[in-house]
Amino acid sequence: MTRLLVHVEGQTEEEFVNEVLAEHLDQRGFSAVSARLFGNARQRSHRQYMMEVQR
């Protein structure tokens, strides 16, 4: 039983892992493959900008 958790930055990557990659890896012996949305680089830079504007 091998499980794989993939940290991704965007919704497109999350969908790719959950819909395409998971099926492929399941055929190769992985029992569970899932993606976790970890963050988005663009959103992080936007948050920094918003914090500076609020000051």
Image: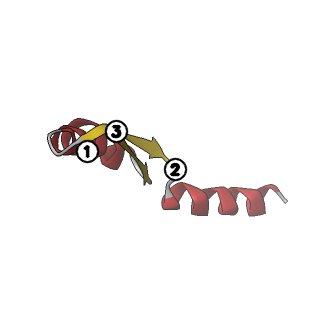
Q: How many marks?
A: 3
Q: Amino acid at mark 3?
A: Met
Q: Position of residue 55 (x, y in %)?
A: 85, 60
Image quadrant in which you'd find residue 34: top left
Image quadrant in which you'd find residue 45: bottom right
Residue at 19%, 41% (x, y): give it: 20
Distance of label 1 from label 2 (alpha carbons): 15 Å
- Which residue is tagged 1? 16
Ranked by sequence position, the earlier of labels 1 and 2 is 1
Q: Name the element at disc 2.
A: loop
- Which residue is tagged 2? 38
Q: Position of residue 11 (x, y in %)?
A: 38, 43
Q: Name the element at disc 1.
A: helix
The quarter of the picture where the N terminus appears is top left
Residue at 46%, 43% (x, y): give it: 36
Image quadrant in which you'd find residue 28: top left
Q: Amino acid at mark 2?
A: Phe
Residue at 50%, 60% (x, y): give it: 42
**Is mark 1 in CB contact (under 8 Å) with mark 2?**
no
Distance of label 2 from label 3 (alpha carbons): 24 Å
Q: Amino acid at mark 1?
A: Phe
Residue nearer the viewer, 47 or 23: 23
**Is mark 2 in CB contact (under 8 Å) with mark 3?**
no
**Disc 2 crowd, CA 10 A, few/some/many (<14, 14-19, 20+):** few
